[in-house]
Amino acid sequence: MISREKRAAASAAASPYAHLTYQHRLNFYDEPPRYNITLDEFESCAIDRLRILSEIESCLARNRSPEDMKTVIDAQCRKFLPLDANTASKLVDVDAQRKRDHLGHFVLRLAFCRSEELRRRFVKSETMLFRIRYELADQNEVNQFLESKKFAWEKASNGELQSLKSELIAVHPRLPWPENGSPPAYYKVNWTSVPDLVAQRKVLLRLGKAYVPATEQESIVLQEFQERIESNLDRTAKALPRLDEDDRILPILGHLADGLLAGIPMDSSFAVTEGDGVTITADMIEDLSRKHFPLCMRNLHDNLRKDKHLKHAGRLQYTLFLKGFGLTLDEAIVFWRKSYRGGKVKDDDFNKEYKYNIRHSYGQEGKRADYPPMNCARIITSQQPSAQESHGCPFKHFSIENLDTALLTKYGSCGMNSSALPEINKYVKDGHYHVACTRVYEITHNIRKGEGLGGGESVTHPNLYARRSMDAAKVLIKAETAPVDPSAMVEG
Amino acid sequence: MASKDDAMNVDYDVSQPQVMFQFYKRLYPYQAIFHWLNQDHAPSRLFTHREFAFTLQGDVYLRYQSFATAEEFQREVCRRSPTRFEIGAIYNARPKDKKVMRPGALQPQRRELVFDIDMTDYDSVRTCCTDKKICARCWGFIAAAVRVLDSGLRNQFGYRQLLWVYSGRRGIHCWVSDAAAMDLTDDQRRALMAWLEVVKGSKDTAKKVNVRFKNGELHPALSSAVRILNPKEGDPATRWNFDGLILHDQDCFKNQEQWEDLLKLLGNADIADSLRKTWQSDTERTSRRKWEDLVKELRKRDKKTQSSVLHAMEEIILQYMYPRLDMEVSKHRNHLLKAPFCVHPSTGRVCVPVDPATVDDFDPERVPTVGQLLSELDRLDGVPGGWEKTSLKPYVEMLERHAQGIIQEARQGRKAAQSLEF
Ligand SMILES: [Zn+2]
């Protein structure tokens, strides 16, 4: 008789990865994570995952080819949600990666189980993420994972296969049937396990059973994954009311759901310090806005020029954007004073009120918080602007007619023309505002469709749009080292 | 509404509410409908959580009706006397409670798999009637569609509980009540419809069938459809097959426009040219002769041409006769479909079940009308009696037999599930 220790030792020797909590990189997320986590972990791993899911949604909306999508998502995953194989370098803590993956999935499950629409989108993008990982994994890894799941897939018997031979060959002419050997391997599953193969008539159906070649196993696995996610989401939705008591978690979940609805994570941030010490001065804005600003900011800028004034929400959106763009506080005051000159606000009032607001935005007044520039999610979900207001996202907040006119007048000189409008309008109608904006970037920068801001990335932040546009034009402005003359602030 | 054999029944006008009331009070087979939908004798969720929708006089449409029992169902149908009513999904709650639920909370869960085939979709191929008309001759298209679909649903998908129902004017419905079919999600229904859909494209699309694999083969499911539509020697005889219906009865390639369509579909300019010469000079040549000409012409050609044109001929058979399904009806669980035994408002005919085994001989013009049935009751001179005293009887019995079969199978299913648990 073998002792328990010996047996454990033997199995550990059989698998060099026995010490791992998560034996496999792939996960069906059947078991909830069972350990304590901090609220920060709770939120951050969900946000990173949401970033990936949103990118998947925009790839689907932009009709990218499966291969392109795989490349884009793989790159994004490496950045935000790395998930290495067991064979990865010893320096990589694969358990920690898998824990984040596991956790992120469950937090988003909580956030997205509440409405039919969110559930549908979650299932679709999670299944796609699983599919990409499955296809990128090596066959050994996949096989080990599948063995561990102990699926009850029935192999069709050789006798049965022989009796269906001519029909099976008609459906799968390229599967070799050896003269004397046994037939190729087929699974026999309920047809509902492989709806995609059925929809394309890629299987033989007999009395409700589909004969699926072992080479098409992926379809069965993906369907299995999707069905489990669906039924788990239903169960989570039923359990959710109990969570309602935790008022720390609910706001986070709501926030995450808003992010998916906006098509982008709410936290897409833009590091102001990123970049290379470019200093922008007030008098450069006019010219740069024409070349490098996204439509929301062009709209604010042009309205500011026309009215010599912006309402509060627009002023805040634009001030923070310019701050992120590299306009220092001093230059900002110069810029705004100049822009307001000749308008309804007197210089005196400007000094009293508006200067305070600008300094406040730069964290120099009040709570002295350093307010970050607004991201697309924030701008898209901001309040519908009234007739006098110009803030928000034109793709979301303009009528289609006004949007088209704005695109043609503001970007007509850099390649925008009416033949591009139907496609952009379609994205808008489907609620993919940032995809529409990304398409505008591609057209006005003469970039191949699908490239986005580079490597397929879509617009999630107006400052990212502007920064990439500047980079693309190789606009390099020498850092201004001399301190600004204080008198310039008064003289403008 | 009056057809030649019920000239004495003209007094009954289905647009009159009292006529519909009489029909619902004395003739409608509530018990059989209840058994069929409920799949059991005691009311289950399959009935109590089921949506009914009424169309009342003046096109008032009442959705989300539901009933606790067969008696309540009967009472409400009589009280409302709808011009027709439809059957929908089984929901997670009683549909009539929708008003007091939070928006979006009422969700469809299960539902028979349903199909709708309408003669209008055959207007580009049938030659006997157009538009709203239908006759015993163009019924041939429906009969052929029923044979193909019935066989596919049974042999490929393994369903057994199929009920075919005449739609009252120019089409047919099919209701599949197997537990596995009731359980299908909308995505699975979509996949099943994609499997079944063969004839695609608008009326301006010349070639509406593009279903071959890259290597030129047909999927076995479609080869068997071709064989049902164009049986080989030794196969069971059918009246409405490609030869009987398309070549002979409908004579689909009679005039020049029609046979030019055929030549275009052959995809071989050489054969088309030589046939065109013969056909242009003989305006009386029948479609049957033309098809024979084609076969003779083909014999003279090399193997490669023969194979490609034979493929085209199979596709022509599918294009003219394969079931043309209303896709949307079948894809969603919450889609409503007119209940069996309703009365078609413009023909007055009752939507009776059809036996697929004898579908070739079904004559829509011989389906009883409300007027005829009420007259049959009148002739009883006050003797009490309902549908069992009229020509509706065989149809009701057909539904009741079907329902009993479903009940038995459902019971066996429950027993099997129990024995697994212990
Ligand atoms: Zn006809």
Image: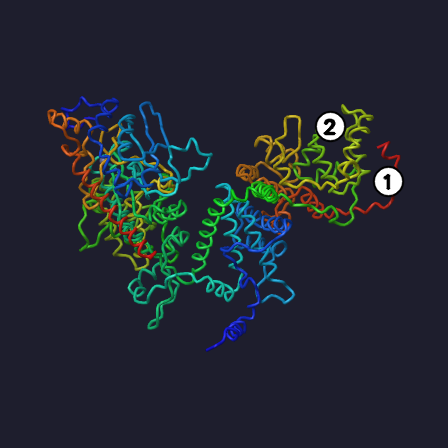
Decide if residue B353 is in sight here.
Answer: yes
- The verdict on label 1 being within 8 Å of ligand 1 is no
State whether residue B168 is above or below residue A442.
above
Q: Is residue A238 left or right of residue A420?
A: left
Question: For the point 56% across and 63% down, which residue is it?
Answer: A21
Tell me the subunit letter for badge 1. A
Please name the amino acid that badge 1 sits on: Val
Camera-nearest residue between B200 and A161? A161
State the image coordinates of residue B365 (x, y, percent, origin top left). 19, 33
Decide if residue A264 is in sight here.
Answer: no
State the image coordinates of residue A79 (x, y, percent, origin top left). 63, 55
Camera-nearest residue between A316 and B198? A316
Q: Which residue is mark 2?
A: A309
Separation of marks 2 and 1 at Cα, in angstroms: 25 Å
Q: Are marks 2 and 1 on the same chain?
A: yes
Q: Is residue A426 left or right of residue A416?
A: left
Camera-nearest residue between B170 and B422? B422
Q: Is residue A177 left or right of residue A312?
A: left
Q: Which residue is mark 1?
A: A484
